[in-house]
Image: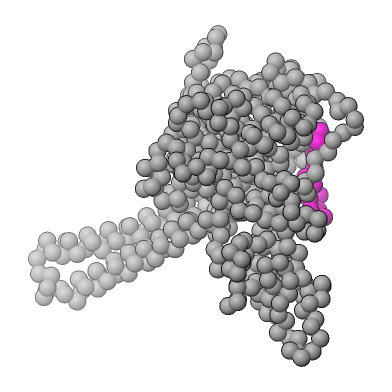
Amino acid sequence: MDTLSLLSVARASRLSLPLATAAAPLRSRSLSGGARIAQSRRRRAARLSVSAVAAETPRTEDAPSPSPSPSGQELFDWLDQWYPFAPVCDLDPGAPHGKTVLGLSVVAWYDRGAGEWRVFDDACPHRLAPLSEGRIDDKGRLQCVYHGWCFDGAGACKFIPQAPALGPPVHKNSKACVASYPCVVQNNILWFYPRAEPEHKDVLQRKPPPLIPEIDDPGFVTVYGIRDLPYGYDVLVENLFDPAHVPYAHKGIMRGIRKKEDPGRVDYDKEGGGPIKMKIEAANVEGFVSPQERGFFQFIAPSTLVGSPFSQEKAPRILLVFLCVPVAPGRSRVIWAFPRNVGVWLHNITPRWLYHVGQNLILDSDIFLLHVEERKFAAVGLDNWQKACYVPTSSDNMVIAFRNWFRKFCKNRVGWATPQVDQLPPTPTKDQLMERYWSHVAQCTSCSAALKAMKALEVALQIASVAVVGFLAVAKGTLVTSTVQRAVVVSTAVLCFAASRWLANFIQKNFYFQDYIHAYK
């Protein structure tokens, strides 16, 4: 949640939660929007059960085997879905923003004339230069900075500087247009639909993105975050559905809650791990729901994971919302939103970047594990996942349910919007793998502003230390006459220099790179 580093909720709950578990209440009197959408979809879809494990592993009692589809295999349509672009708080209306989603390079920009965000193909039709490197011109149009072509909110070219004013209106040719995708701001997040054909213009009326009412509730506060990750979509979702890894992978950041009600247990570890009971219900092509011991978790395919570690029948209410974005093979993006109606005062006095310091450390602590794990999955083949992995306990049921969904309805493949090389990128050095600046800070307005301010303060402290020493040299024997005065001046210079060095180290660790060595946690 959005208390710093998710620590307070992780410790308060009987169920250990990662920066990584999400779902929606199933039987709550006040279901989240995601749960309501999933329920309506379940009424239209055949109910499918979920296997707990492959035939080679013991079966758990809470996750039944899947039944075959009566009329052939129903496949998940990756292009008939809404995908999150970014939280609106991290989008500057005065500049275009480029991202890759589902293998598709897109640019978001704010159309001042209509007062709406737009999402286009990130390629100028002239020479395919990236429009995300462009600017918003003085008329509020998106301008390509390569040759100055300008486009309106519908993607129509309105101005070609190189075309004579009295010549043919070449800017009106359909080849001069940019593909414009349906998009909408919902829950303060910009979503887009990856099909630009005219028949999809009104897709919002037919199929809106999943709605989380708590985020829009004035009684709740929400902290948003975004980060690009060096592993694929399926590994990201699998990890978010795995609460059992929290006290081990995130040791030193989050701790487990020892379960005293495990009969017969005599062996305990200091991390506090233990059995987690979870069931899988209503599993079908649209996702599944997992009731937990106290909370509820739900997967609304393909991007939304929403839930809570607490019963929704009583306050406080805290939701975990994760939006998982397939970027490219071996690359994904997570957008998180943690709405809560408790500790509102803490939200009002804590800067957003400070929340992100802890949340990024949680992500850092399992980046290398998941990056390597993905390559081992690729080596054995995802079709052999359940043969290669031994998952005998109920604690793995949500992971197994997702892997069954991905296998059954997606054939273990993401349906990319553009052709992709079916090969994982090479493993970089650890400082590149876990870097924070480009993966998060450059995309986050709060962290970017904090970094800029801290760098300015670092320089100011260094200048102050030099200036104080210079003052001492100039004033020696005049203004500064006593030993005590000289000691005070020297101490001030030393403190300023030490503070600048501490601040430089803080900046490096929290905005650029911080290694996480599990052996010493």
173 left or right of 350?
right
| Residue 504 place in picture, x, y as percent | 41, 58
**317 over 441 or under it: above or below:** above
Provide the major secondary structure of the magenta segment. loop
Q: Is residue 19 visible?
A: no
Q: Residue at x 77, y 47 (%)?
A: 80
Q: Residue at x 53, y 15 (%)?
A: 267
**426 over 468 or under it: above or below:** above
In the rendered image, which quarter is residue 164 located in? Answer: bottom right
Q: Looking at the image, what colour scheme do you see?
A: one colour
Which sits in the foreground, 440 or 171? 171
- Magenta stretch, residue numbers: 407-423
Q: Residue at x 15, y 65 (%)?
A: 486
Outermost right residue: 71
126 left or right of 228?
right
166 left or right of 19?
right
| Residue 423 place in picture, x, y as percent | 79, 49
**418 over 268 or under it: above or below:** below
Outermost top residue: 264
In the rendered image, which quarter is residue 480 located in? Answer: bottom left
Q: Residue at x 36, y 63 (%)?
A: 457
Q: Is 122 one of the magenta-colored residues? A: no
In the rendered image, which quarter is residue 277 located in? Answer: top right
Which sits in the foreground, 240 or 280? 280
| Residue 173 place in picture, x, y as percent | 82, 76
Q: What is the count of numbered marks? A: 0
